[in-house]
Amino acid sequence: MDNILQQQDLKFDAKPKKFVVWLFVVSSTIMFGGFTSYYIVFAASKGKGHGLVLPDAFMYSTAILLGSSIFLFLATKALRRGNRKSQQLFLWVTLALAVVFGYLQLQAWSSLFQSGATLINNNAAISVIYVVSGMHLLHIIGGLFFIMSSLLGSYKGISEEKAIYRQEITSIFWHFIDILWIYLYVFLLLNS
Amino acid sequence: MSTISLQDKHHDNHDDHGHDHHKETFITKYIFSQDHKMIAKQFLITGIIMAVIAMLLSILFRLQLAWPDKNFPILETFLGKWAEGGRIKPDFYLALVTIHGTIMVFFVLTAGLSGTFSNLLIPLQLGARDMASPFLNMLSYWFFFTACVIMMGSFFIQTGPASAGWTVYPPLSALPKAIDGSGLGMTMWLASMVLFVASSLMGGINYVSTVLNMRTKGMDLWKMPLTIWAFFLTAILGILSFPVLVAGVVLLIFDRSVGTSFYLSDIVLGTEILPNEGGSPILWQHLFWFLGHPEVYIVIMPALGISSEIISVNSRKPIFGYHAMVYSLIGITTLSFIVWGHHMFVTGMNPLLGGVFMITTLIIAVPSAVKTFNYLATLWRGNIRFTPAMLFAIGLVSFFISGGLTGIFLGNAALDINLHDTYFVVAHFHLVMGSAAIFGMLAGVYHWFPKMFGRLMNEKLGYLHFWITFICAYLVFFPLHFLGLDGVPRRYYAFTEFEFMNKWLTVNVFVTWAAIIAALAQVAFLFNFFHSIFKGKKSTQNPWEANTLEWTTPVERLHGNWPGEIPTVYRWPYDYSKPGAEHDFIPQTVPYSQTMSSNLPHDFEGNTEAEEIQKEWDAKNKPSTETAE
Ligand code: HEM
Ligand SMILES: [Cu+2]
């Protein structure tokens, strides 16, 4: 008799797990809050920020990342309509744009570096640019895993409930890192 | 109604990676377990081992403080070149205090305490089968375990462990060449802490999600035991503060390994002028203490929650001021984010800002005091059962008072300028945080041991353990106040080199003896703990006659917790000695319809229908009191 459960407990419950992703978003936001507070206090006490014109690559990468969010949104809509083929297509596009984003970030670093604004710098505000964009890039890599798990699930034909769950946590995370990057970019633009 | 075995449900819940045959093996049951109860035990036992290690480290540096000129050849046998000729070396002394502090604060009192009791009690007291994400929960333990291994590993490298203090202030910690301990040992410290923070976050996120989403029917927030409130708010505190430490640590890693200048400026190392320019070590202090102060409450709040429960159960009285307890926990949680500056009064802080931090610091003493008074009021004229758990809970209250009072001294910027970095601070936090939280943790172990292992611990040994530890803790830490008032600084290896401190040598000898006796008393605990796991007296289902849900689960501890349906909750957890009731406790699962003789009007929370029924019943059965209406 023991080890027996009622049927109602067996339902897959996505809500608490989705909430876990939300809480991760909160704590990650706070970590970046830590970096930007460092920047603010540093800049306030030295009376200077990074003092650079940010490379154009950052502008393009921002646009690309926004685009990837739109395609992810389309993928979710496709899944809701039950159209897994177009969900897969849109996820692939998202994935590709994410890779382009990563490439553009590296591009931006290289043009910063060539302009003399190196990571090892006696102006820590410039080093912060590398650190925050680098930590953000780590989040992008994490996001790629989310996208791939959604994609994999779609190909394997997992149940609708679970497919939607995976798609949803991917969306929460990906839209978050999108907004996060916009925040960082605007922050760096405003506090030069 | 169809029924299916538990393993299937479990396996349904996490991702389908295709292992369909699900038999529990030794590995899935005891090692990579996803059952919250097993994970709790893993945290507890790892925590106990780390606590013993950290305690032994403290005995080593206490030897140095008491007998600075004496040789202990045996030390050389164990420590080799770090205690050449039987004398602990200055560098190693610093490593000892650093690792002692780090282990105690983070590994024992954060992971050991929250990891054990949040994991054990959140699902059990809320009526859930497991955590929101059992997989993440398992990961959380293994990150913690790896962090422990790396931290201990630093004892086995040439240059020894980190030695910049548990707060690892740069520039000392940022310059690998500054002292031995800032080399590889410091790198390992940082790596270990990154894993530790990841583990804490995974745990905390899981706890919060479980509390908010997985309570059983009837368990609204205001019916939760205070333990759960405390664990819940602790987890929130962790989620909001630990990431800031990560930010600080990342920048420190860059300074150490890449050559950036986040915290460094104008440094001459030996004869070499370092190129780093423009950074500021004070910024590390801000980032560190923005976590560090909440961290001390992350340590104490679970212990306070555990004590609330144990004191109420063993006083056979409802907890005094349940709502006030919750609101003061919320108050502490909120306020603890705006007081970090009190650790930085001597950093050249603007006096106005110092004043602000001083006021916020003194305000946080108010909710702390509310909690203390409520404990005392709960004990007042209770029908007290002095179980070992109860004694330890009362011990917590005692330490929380005596250590909290000195906090009010330190919170005054003008006084703190004198007291900062002296033994007064050491006395303060070892009483209010160290001793109080350890006592809360031990109280929890004695109280919930039957839930974890199905057996009882030996009471006699428990009393012996309590009295020696309690008395010795005061003998160790109380005298340190006077050293501090006289200006003896903390973390000094050779304090006898200073004329005015020589007179404190005898006190240090006394303190070291008290510490040694306290350490020996822990043997009674360790023996009791491990022996009782296998040989203790078998426990009944509800040995303490408590109201909370965990005692409605079978003694055998099933994966999934309840064999049948999860029980429904009808009342708050503190109906002890309710007038008119048959027994002196009414479990949360007993509906009001079964306790007509003890119901009170406010029990129905404005449900008029139930009030009517109660009135009719009263009219029939208690003619003398209610007919007047
Ligand atoms: C009554 C409320 C409290 C007040 C007003 C207070 C105030 C202070 C102040 C001002 C300091 C800084 C002293 C210095 O470094 O010069 C301090 C240090 C400390 N407090 Fe408290 N405290 C209180 C309660 C607590 C509690 C409840 C805990 C832990 C559970 C705690 C743990 C610590 C620790 C660990 C340190 C020392 C950190 C270090 O420098 O290594 N305090 N406290
Ligand atoms: Cu503090």
Image (cartoon, coloured by chain):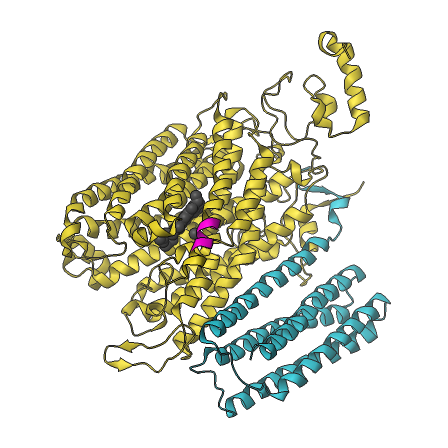
Chain colours: A cyan, B yellow
Q: Is B245 in front, or is B425?
A: B425
The magenta segment is B355-360
Q: Based on the displayed image, in which of its 4 quarters is residue A132 positioned?
A: bottom right
Q: Position of residue B252 (x, y in %)?
A: 42, 71
Query: What residue is drawn where x is 83% and y is 75%?
Result: A86
Residue found farthest to the front: B352
**Figure quadrant of the N terminus of chain B:** top right
Q: Is residue B94 above or below residue B546?
A: below
Q: Is B199 in front, or is B423?
A: B423
Task: Give left or right: position of B274 versus B313.
Answer: left
Query: What residue is drawn where x is 56% and y is 68%?
Result: A32
**Figure quadrant of the C terminus of chain B:** top right
Q: Is B335 in front, or is B147?
A: B335
Q: Is A48 in front, or is B231?
A: A48
Magenta run includes residue B187 = no
Q: Is residue B139 above or below residue A108?
A: above
Q: Main secondary structure of the magenta part?
A: helix
Query: What residue is drawn where x is 46% and y is 43%?
Result: B365
Q: Is residue B539 visible?
A: no
Q: Position of residue B211 (x, y in %)?
A: 64, 46
Residue found farthest to the bottom: A114
Q: Position of residue B503 (x, y in %)?
A: 15, 46
